[in-house]
Amino acid sequence: MDFVSVVFDNKIEVDLLKLQLITFRNVNIDIVNTLFILFNDNKHKLSKWLDDILECCPANLRWKIQFIFPSDLVVLPKGEVYVSNWYSQQFTKLAVSKIISTKHYVVLDAKNHFISPITHETFFREDGKIKLYQETHNDDLLNFYSNCFRYFGLDDIEKHNPFTSPCYIQTTTPFVFVTNECKSMITYIEQKENTTFYDFFYNSWKYTEFFLYFAYICFTKNTSYCYLPQQIDNVIIGPADPNKYQWNSWQSKSTFLKTNNPSCMSVSSKCVNVIDTNYKQQLKNFYSKRFDTDMINDIIDQIFSD
């Protein structure tokens, strides 16, 4: 199975990617076909980060890494400049399906770090169905959700919700795509709109990658997924102030870690602005115990000093 990790030209994001690569030592190397590092920015900007990124790769993973760029996924009209932002990043997670060679692919953000042993069963049930978890969303995201379903003529979103409102599908990574379904969706949209998928998606500002893909899965009645009515297998350190939102406190995350033993920890680059010194030290201690290396301590110190 191919893995795709998306990063862009930002020091904290690159440092988070370096952490991710170190944590790939927890991944059974046999489930990784190729690890694509998708640098969602101008190609020339990668050179200043390249050596540091590769230094963090486990030796058995390095030969499986391939760097790719937006220019590998889309050809823009002459004079049009590709802009790296939230929407173009979403576009790349779908468009990358065109170069994937495996039946499924896993999309990661740089913030996703593997903190427990990762096997095929992390992502798939015994019967081969892909695991998909529930999540609650704010009103803005639910508007995107409705837009995506309406695009495919599915007006009754609750009819196609595998969970019970206010829970809907996860929109956090890691996320497993069915490669051919993603390619088929892009072809369907391009033929319907008579334009490129990039122009459709980027210029509309009405859709999000996971919701659009899931709406298409419902539209085609694809049965590749199983829907687990539980929180995603991922402890997420978000950008919300933990003094106002208890769910983002270290106490809450620590309890989740002990109770659920998740496979992944996700650290938002924006959390550095809202968590205090003690919280940062707790995170550093957590990583240090899981990955006993000076390199990981140095990277974390860099993240929290920026």
Image (spheres, grey):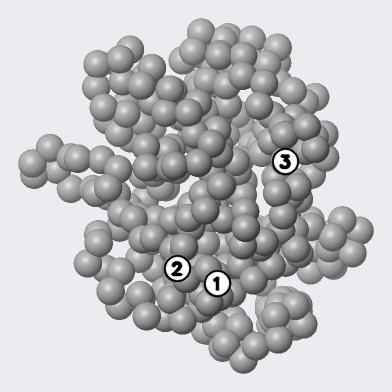
Crowding near pointer 1: few (<14 within 10 Å), some, many (20+)? few
Confirm or deny contact between disc 3 and disc 2 (CB under 8 A). Answer: no
Residue 141, placed above or below residue 21:
above
Residues 66 and 33: in front is: 33
Does residue 156 appear to the left or right of 128 in the view shown?
left
Q: Position of residue 96 (x, y in %)?
A: 40, 42
Crowding near pointer 3: few (<14 within 10 Å), some, many (20+)? some
Does residue 267 appear to the left or right of 288 in the view shown?
left
Q: Residue furthest front?
A: 30
Confirm or deny contact between disc 1 and disc 2 (CB under 8 A). Answer: yes
Q: Which residue is mark 3?
A: 124
* The image quarter in which residue 124 lies: top right
Amino acid type assigned to the residue bearing label 2 in the image:
Trp
Q: Which residue is mark 1?
A: 60
Q: Using the rendered image of the protein, determine whether residue 167 is visible from the camera's viewpoint.
A: no
Q: Position of residue 175 (x, y in %)?
A: 60, 43
Residue 63 is labelled as 2
Amino acid type assigned to the residue bearing label 3 in the image:
Phe
